[in-house]
Amino acid sequence: MNESANESEALVPLPWIQASDGNSSLELSSLFPFFAINPWDIMLCISGTIIACENAIVVAIIFYTPTLRTPMFVLIGSLATADLLAGFGLIMNFVFQYVIQSETVSLVTVGFLVASFTASVSSLLAITVDRYLSLYNALTYYSERTILWIHLMLIITWGVSICLGLLPILGWNCLEDSSSCSIVRPLTKSNVTLLSASFFFIFTLMLHLYIKICKIVCRHAHQIALQQHFLTASHYVATKKGVSTLAIILGTFGASWLPFAIYCVVGDHDYPTVYTYATLLPATYNSMINPIIYAYRNTEIQRAMWVLFCGCFQSKVPFRSRSPSDV
């Protein structure tokens, strides 16, 4: 009976992060579980709130603006939707862990977060592939085949994400065997290893595509220098802008997720939970930065934002569908 009580108290700070007796930062929450709130949980909740608000605006803009229904903006909408759900998941986790302490709720919350963040990372890969195709097959990019390819990527992205999110709920968890727990309870060590391996694969593939895009841009620059056609210089400038944006995306993506992905592999459930919090919190910042990089810097979305929320922006210049390399 005493062992059961101690275990329930250890889960109070965060049900899906394995608690450690040697972690002094969580002692206050363990001593006063009903009155004290872990500051790390507060920061995660604040991060989730900002993520949800930012991406909710992007989703609303794309949904209510017919001119933003092109494949490029559909992929951006997929990314914003995934990040929006991730933000909601962080908020729900904060609410449920201090109101409803249940193993079932813990499994559902973890599964929801896994699915949301997996969809976010996969959407980044889909956008990278789309940008590569817009440069590699520029003449045939605006075709039915591209639309079919975009829809196929979306189906695979969300299908795989939902399946990975369902795994803990369907039984791949460590509730019955605490020794198999990872740094993220109730996920098993093998589960987080699979997720980390998937991340490393996506990151490597994105890096490979980024290098290919750079080669295409250099080839375009060489052709422009030979032909000296000033009319084509604007396309090169736009393409160069897209590549620089991709470099920022890849850099922030790696800086945000690599520490947590590496710690998932090398960490153990006996390690102090402060390490898990310290690597997980920066990972959430990627979902916070995504709408700034993809949406709010885009001219069409800026115009649509004025129309949707203000209605005072009048422009005689019609919307035009831009290639992904322009964003």
Image (tube, rainbow, N blue to C red):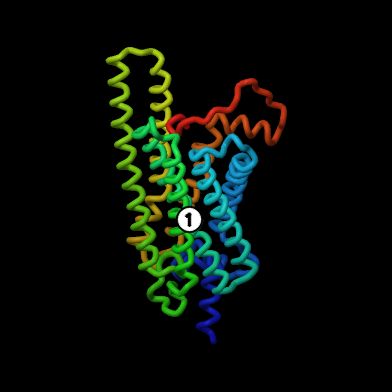
Residue at 38 percent across and 31 percent down: it is 138
For residue 225, which quarter of the picture?
top left
For residue 191, which quarter of the picture?
bottom left
Quadrant showing the N terminus: bottom right
Above or below: residue 257 compared with residue 302: below
Indicate the position of residue 136 as horizontal and vertical percent values.
Answer: 34, 34
Residue 230 in the figure: left or right of residue 222: right
For residue 128, which quarter of the picture?
top left
| Of the pair 284 and 27, the residue shown nearer to us | 284
Q: Is residue 270 visible?
A: no
Indicate the position of residue 270 as horizontal and vertical percent values.
Answer: 39, 69
Indicate the position of residue 234 as horizontal and vertical percent values.
Answer: 42, 19
Residue at 50 percent across and 37 percent down: it is 294
Indicate the position of residue 190 as horizontal and vertical percent values.
Answer: 35, 68
Mark 1, secondary structure of its residue: helix
* Number of callouts: 1
Residue 257 in the figure: left or right of residue 60: left
The residue at the far front in this view is 144
| Of the pair 314 and 106, the residue shown nearer to us | 314
| Of the pair 155 and 312, the residue shown nearer to us | 155
Residue at 32 percent across and 42 percent down: it is 207
Q: Which three-letter amino acid code belongs to the residue tagged 1?
A: Trp
Q: Is residue 158 visible?
A: yes
Residue named by callout 1: 158
Q: Badge 1: how crowded within 10 Å, few (<14), some, or many (20+)?
A: many
Residue at 35 percent across and 55 percent down: it is 262
Above or below: residue 34 compared with residue 299: below
Residue 33 in the figure: left or right of residue 228: right
